[in-house]
Image: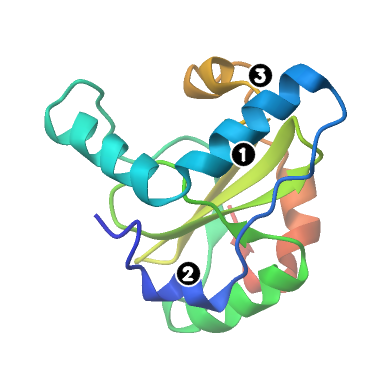
């Protein structure tokens, strides 16, 4: 997998989770600080390889298409819109990079860009705040209008 060696991730900053105000959330915050990114990536990849957990295909919520020749320029643009690389995310089939834009400690906008120019995204709980809800896709939403504001004219909307 390309988790630790993806050259496109060098074009965008890392996503930095805000420090939470609640003490129970601080414990979660420090846990995720400890597992980032090497131990987490190796554990996830091992669980996927042994089929303890499964993930394949592309997730829901097609936003539109991007010219595949402009992916690098697009990444630089969406970094200005608050998106950053996040090591926790699954990697869908043919995904070249996934990023998120945080909406506080509890929620995030998550975008995926694919080699063929397809762009998918959704709004969801952060894995750091609500790991199980995140994995089970509880409360996941499309939020196309929000993504259109962030992505601008770079994407042809479906």
Q: Position of residue 5 (x, y in %)?
A: 32, 67
Q: Is residue 51 above or below residue 14?
A: above
Q: Position of residue 19 (x, y in %)?
A: 79, 40
What residue sits right under mark 2 in the picture? Answer: 9
Question: In whole angstroms, how far apart are the C-alphas of marks 2 and 1?
Answer: 20 Å
What residue sits right under mark 3 in the picture? Answer: 139
Horizontal relation, residue 118 to residue 73: left or right: left
Question: In percent of the image, x 29 and y 60: which residue is there?
Answer: 2
Question: In whole angstroms, how far apart are the C-alphas of marks 2 and 3?
Answer: 27 Å
Point out the tag, 2 or 1, that comes first from the N-terminus. 2
**Image quadrant for the N terminus?**
bottom left
Quadrant of the rendered image containing residue 94? bottom left
Using the image, tell me which numbered label, if any, was put on residue 122.
Answer: 1
Quadrant of the rendered image containing residue 126? top right
Q: Residues within 10 Å of mark 3 (few under 14, many from 20)?
A: few
Q: Is residue 75 above or below residue 85?
A: below
Quadrant of the rendered image containing residue 3? bottom left
Horizontal relation, residue 57 to residue 138: left or right: left
The answer to whether residue 91 is visible is no
Q: Position of residue 83 (x, y in %)?
A: 68, 60
Point out the tag, 2 or 3, that comes first from the N-terminus. 2
Point out the tag, 1 or 3, that comes first from the N-terminus. 1
């Amino acid at each position: 997998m390309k988790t630790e060696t993806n050259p496109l991730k060098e074009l965008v900053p890392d996503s930095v989770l805000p420090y939470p105000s609640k003490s129970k959330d601080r414990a979660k915050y420090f846990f995720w600080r400890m597992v980032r990114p090497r131990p987490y990536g190796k554990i996830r990849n091992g669980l996927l390889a042994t089929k303890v957990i499964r993930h394949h295909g592309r997730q829901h919520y097609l936003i539109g298409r991007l010219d595949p020749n402009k992916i690098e320029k697009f990444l630089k643009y969406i970094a200005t819109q608050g998106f950053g690389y996040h090591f926790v995310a699954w990697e869908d089939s043919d995904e070249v990079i996934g990023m998120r834009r945080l909406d506080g400690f509890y929620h995030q906008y998550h975008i995926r860009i694919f080699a063929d120019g397809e762009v998918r995204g959704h709004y969801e709980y952060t894995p750091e705040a609500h790991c199980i809800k995140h994995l089970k896709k509880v409360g996941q939403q499309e939020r196309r209008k929000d993504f259109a504001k962030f992505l601008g004219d770079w994407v042809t909307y479906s």
